[in-house]
Amino acid sequence: MSTAAHRRPLPLQIALWVFIAVWFMMAAFPFFWTLWGSFKVELDFFSIADWTNALTGANTQSTYGSPFTTAGYEGAFIQNEFWRNSINTFIVCFCVVTVSLTIGTLGGYALSRSGYKYVFWLLIIALMFRALPQITLVSGYLPIFFDWNIWGYLPTAILVLVAINQPFTLWMLHSFFESIPKDLDEAAKVDGCTQFQAFRFVIIPVMWPGVITTGLFSFLLAYNDFVVTALILNEGNRTMVPQIAAFLGTTYTEGNVMFAVAAVVSATAPLFILVMFFQRQIVSGLTAGAVKG
Amino acid sequence: MKHRTFFWFFLPTAAAMLLFIALPIVSVITQSFFTPHEAVLIETENCGPFGCTKETTIDQDATAAIREAQPLGRFVGWQIYTDRGHLAFGEVGEAWRNSDGLRSFAGSLMNLPFYDALVFTLTYTFICTPFLIILGFTIAVAVNSLHRRLKGLMIFFSLLPMIVTPLIGALVLSWMVDSRGVLGNFLSWLVSDPDLSVKASTPLMWVCLIVYGIWSSAPFAFVVFYAGLQTVPQDTLESAQIDGATRWQQIRFVVIPHLAPLVTFVALIQLMDNFRVLEPILGFGAQAHAQSLSTFILSDLSGETRQLSSAATTSVLTIIGIAILLTPVLIRTWRDFNAKSH
């Protein structure tokens, strides 16, 4: 495609490069800056005197004898026991992904194989549920959870997150199963399988790409959630994100902003790795709904 | 698939959604009409040699008995909806009578917490959404013109603002625009005002939140449009070139019409998501400058005294708001569906 007609005039090419560079800086710079700064002391991270201190770590050098320090991480993980929150996050994410994929696959498969009109309505209802701000639901849960004494525990939060996740999971898996030819399970049924056997032996072996993509988004929803975990978990069971929010309340007064910075960097790292490995799935997942609908 | 089989396949997910999405909606609607019982007070008169004194105490047993008998609380009808913290009919009417122009009326409206939150939420939603669509589209066109290797790298970094936890993303930016942070320093150097503090000024804080909103959601629009660009019909593009269309005309008359359905999709998702804006306000610590409907509910729900009725009422109003926002889209989907089935 390098014919003369396709070659861009130089000013346009330059404008394009400048734009790309500016967007690259906007997207990536904040994270690198915070990662770099998390190994400094607060006076360097927030440099009032000279902003180059944040790069060279002059104050870190004079405090710890080296331009890098892991004091923030030690403070967060050891002093404030942030590792507990990390474990909670791991439990919540693992359970949410497993449960919501299990029931979501069954539901999404059923939606894609039933030709009746109610499928449309179920999908529209799911879309409306997806539109509800989570916090409005949480204000509905609280009095009931208090009454039943299930407020504050991880399983409660997991159940809630699974349910909140369902509308999106259903939409995605529905459109994915639509792309698997119906002939496959029809053939199995002709050979004498029940619907469930057809699902079990014919569909399950070929459904993994779609399920993995959907699972990624379930994971992101559970990992990034703030509203549900902050309002439903008690202090001892907090996951990472509400704990970081809690750091803001307590550590700002104690002058330990660096704990929060270290916690933020630690909570972002898994997401970085996730995007690195699953970039293609994330992109295809985001576009699946769009291209179909 | 038979109805029966469908039922069993769909049951678990339907149960989850009924229990944790549909029932809570019923629960907020009910709660919004009830308010907690007031404590039962008894007045006793102690008469001594120096006259009588009246004393009020809380009758613990009677209070507990009433709470037991009517666990929902006291029925108050629409009272919570119309009180000062929500729709504030009385105050609005008064402001309307007392104000001498639309401007002063708007001013006094903004002093009412609910309208303040509503105005910010709507401003945020309706400024962020179009801008992020434009930015996302521009990034998509720009990245699409890159070399194949660079594309992957750019997609990776472009995804970051969207993938990262909203609260964390907001915090990272908030530390940078802090008056001691690198961007804050840069801005005050730019306007040569050493005392400039973004976080102290309401308009600047609003701008900041909106910029954050665009920054964090543009990648979504970018990815969707980028995928759409891969399916632009090359024949049409080529014939446009042969007919002498300029680059801009090719984009305007071939690419944009091709992507139009995707724009509707992105707009729909983003309207939903921006309407629930919550984490950025907490991350930037901007509660003093901006309240959204979600933070309004959050502040009722957290804290020592959980004001569940008030939160429930705001929730119902929020749900009505999102319903109004989505009606046009739903009507459109309904028409498309009917057109398809005929």
Image (tube, coloured by chain):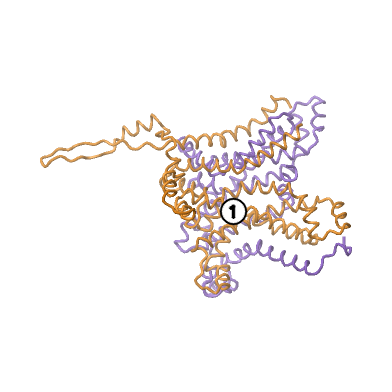
Chain colours: A purple, B orange
Query: Quick check: can you spot residue B107?
Result: yes
Tell me residue B45's x, y (percent).
19, 37
Q: Nearer the viewer, residue A94 or A133?
A: A133
Q: With respect to residue A254, does A229 lie above or below?
A: above
Q: Amino acid at mark 1?
A: Pro
Q: Quadrant of the C terminus of chain A?
A: top right
- Residue at the spot 86% in from the left edge and 59% down from the top edge: B244
Q: Is residue B14 left or right of residue B24?
A: right
Q: Depth check: A157 or B25 in front?
A: B25
Q: Position of residue A207 (x, y in %)?
A: 75, 39
Residue to which mark 1 is pinned? B166
Question: Among all residues in the image, which is located at the extreme left?
Answer: B49
Q: Residues within 10 Å of mark 1 (few under 14, many from 20)?
A: many
Chain hosting mark 1: B
Mark yes or no: residue A95 visible: no
Image coordinates for residue A132, horizontal then vertical, percent: 58, 42
Q: Residue at x 68, y 47 (%)?
A: A216
Residue B64 percent location from the top left of the image: 35, 33
Quarter of the image with the N terminus of chain A in it: bottom right
Residue A129's image quarter?
top right
Where disc 1 sits, the SS reads helix
Q: Residue furthest front?
A: B100
In the rendered image, the vertical position of residue A278 relative to residue A128, given as above or below: below
- The image shows a total of numbered marks equal to 1
The correct choice, above or below, for B1 with respect to B302 in the image is above
